[in-house]
Structure formats: C-alpha cells, structure tokens
Amino acid sequence: QLQLVESGGGLVQPGGSLRLSCAASGFTFDYYAIGWFRQPPGKEGEGVSCISDSGGSTNYADSVKGRFIISRDNAKNTVYLQMNSLKHEDTAVYYCAKAYGSSCIWWGSRTSFGSWGQGTQVTVSS
C-alpha cells in the first residue's frame, strides 16, 4: 500500500533551520517526482518545491528560493527538505506528495500529485 510519511517538523526560532523528511513506500520510488506543499494557518496552500525522479531537476517557489533545498536518496526511498533562514511566514503544515509522473512539470498545481502524506507541523516563532 502506498504511503508517504513526513517527519522533522517542530518549533524553531526565526533564522533557524529544520530538515523535513518524506519516507515513501508501496511504489517504485525512483520512477516518480516528489513535491512539497504547505498549508499556512488560515491561508491557501502553496507548492514549495519539487524534485524529479532522478533528482536531476528541482523547482522552488519564489518565497523559499535560496533558503530551502530539496534532495532525495533513492536508495532510502526518502525525499528531504532542508529549510534554512526560517521566517515567521514559513509557519505551516508541510506535506509531501507523489507526482503522477517522473518530472516536475506543472508542479505548482496540486492536481499534478496523486498521493499525499499526513503532514508535519512547522512553527517559526520566538
């Protein structure tokens, strides 16, 4: 059965760092792109980042470019989101999602992703 499990969220001060993990099972992991999305409290969700099946192509939202780094370890069936220089506005529930294909084309749309994890809370606060 397909599963995506996020971990690594928590409370961090502004300027701090966190690394989120998305552990996948139940499908051929290295065939699919994986994306990260977030849902801030009381706001619309947004796409944060996406990585292609091989890891050779990555995409970022403008709001996180230069601060977040997405990577994957296909041997471990895991995608990571390294979040640096965190800001209050990064506070959200973060979800990873499996794309329908191997690339991140149309990655900004939730409809490009068919399976989702349960989410992990990230709170940036002093």
Image (cartoon, rainbow, N blue to C red):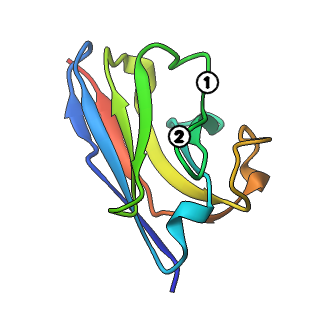
Query: How far is disc 2 from disc 1 in space, using C-alphas?
Result: 11 Å
Q: Secondary structure at mark 2?
A: strand
- What residue is shown at x 45% (from left), y 35% (from top)? 70
| Residue 80 x, y percent position in the rendering | 37, 44
Residue 3 against residue 50 in the figure, above or below: below
| Residue 88 x, y percent position in the rendering | 37, 18
- What residue is shown at x 56% (from left), y 36% (from top)? 42
Residue 7 sits in quarter: bottom left
Residue 85 sits in quarter: top left
Counting residues from the start of the chain, the first of labels 2 and 1 encountered is 2
Q: Secondary structure at mark 1?
A: loop
Q: Contact, CB < 8 Å: mark 2 with mark 1? A: no
- What residue is shown at x 33% (from left), y 50% (from top)? 21
Q: Nearer the viewer, residue 107 or 123?
A: 107
The answer to whether residue 13 is left or right of residue 7 is left
Residue 109 against residue 86 in the figure, above or below: below
The answer to whether residue 64 is left or right of residue 13 is right
How busy is the neighbourhood of tag 1: few (under 14 within 10 Å), some, or many (20 plus)?
some
Q: Can you identify the residue that label 1 sits on?
A: 61
| Residue 69 x, y percent position in the rendering | 42, 28
